[in-house]
Image (cartoon, rainbow, N blue to C red):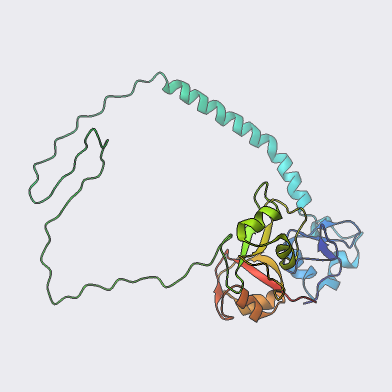
Amino acid sequence: MKICPYLGLLQDPKTPAIFPSERNCCYRAGSARPVLETHQQAYCLAEAHPTCPVFLDPESAPDGETSYTQSLSATSKNILPYAFALLVLLGVVLAAWLYRDSFIQPASPPPVAALPQATSQEYATATPESGPLATLLVTPTPSPRPTNTPPAPTETSSVTPPPGLGVPIGSSPALVIHRVASGESLTTISKLYGTTETAIRAVNLLLPIPVWENWLVVVPHQTEDVADLPLFEVYQVNVDGVTASSLAEQLNVDASLLAQYNNLGQDDFFADGQWVLVPHTRR
């Protein structure tokens, strides 16, 4: 896959994400400009990037080709006053409702009808010690069943849900995708998973220092030996029915390594929304 040489990250203009991402920016006009993910798919990350309107003429290209974050920010600013007014209105309505309820006396509870005398069933009623009991315990009289009719088989699921964030993936070694919480650092994360800061730095393709809140970090689980591991980036599948081999072709990475580190076969499917370890061989 041919990638546009003017595509890069906001913090690293020389290194782009190899899949459509809001972190990618266009540097064709000099300064960083956000790029629509649909535009990245059609031009920036494809062999057609030399035909991109911005690539051909960055001065006369329409803003719509790249300006997404700016228009979104403007829309948010226009909506903000209305959202604030709506919150104030809801607060006034809630206060009025609570004030009204403070003058309303609760209605007397309806009389409780006595339970009929038990025959073939046993009833459990409320007691002061146990509190109100809303469940009626019934022991039905068993009905005869033909002895020649076998019980229906119980169908059990054989599908194992894909691992999520914070769960070890694979083995030798296992890897964890960790979302950075407020106040966390590489030191606290390394202690949490039994590894070192050096090992974490060594396996992440992109890692801001100090690490940012909500950043997805690949962490070796209970090991410091990462000398033979590739560099990893995190990707989230957004459709059903994607195999490891087809995703590897889309991301331009080794299919066998992608399947190995995600504990799958090359013909196994990723689930919609599943987080994926994307390996990049070291150069």
Where is residue 90? Give x, y as percent.
Answer: 56, 31
Q: Quadrant of residue 141?
A: bottom left
Q: As displayed, is residue 55 above or below residue 116? A: below
The answer to whether residue 179 is visible is: no
Residue 159 located left or right of residue 9:
left
| Residue pictured at 52% horizontal, 27% vertical | 93
As drawn, is 266 to the left or to the right of 26?
Answer: left
The image quadrant where one finds the C terminus is bottom right
What residue is drawn where x is 64% and y is 31%?
A: 85
Q: Give me the residue at 66% from left, 66% from top.
A: 235
User: Which image quarter is the N terminus in?
Assistant: bottom right
**Rendered location of residue 9, percent (x, y):** 80, 61
For the view shown, which residue lies furthest in the top direction?
103
Give residue 196's position: percent from left, percent from top.
69, 61
Rendered position, 208 above or below 125: below
Quadrant position of residue 12: bottom right
Camera-nearest residue between 119 and 198:
198
Res 156 visible:
yes
Figure check: 194 above or below 254: above
Of 218 and 133, which appears nearest the observer? 218
Q: Is residue 149 above or below residue 30?
A: below
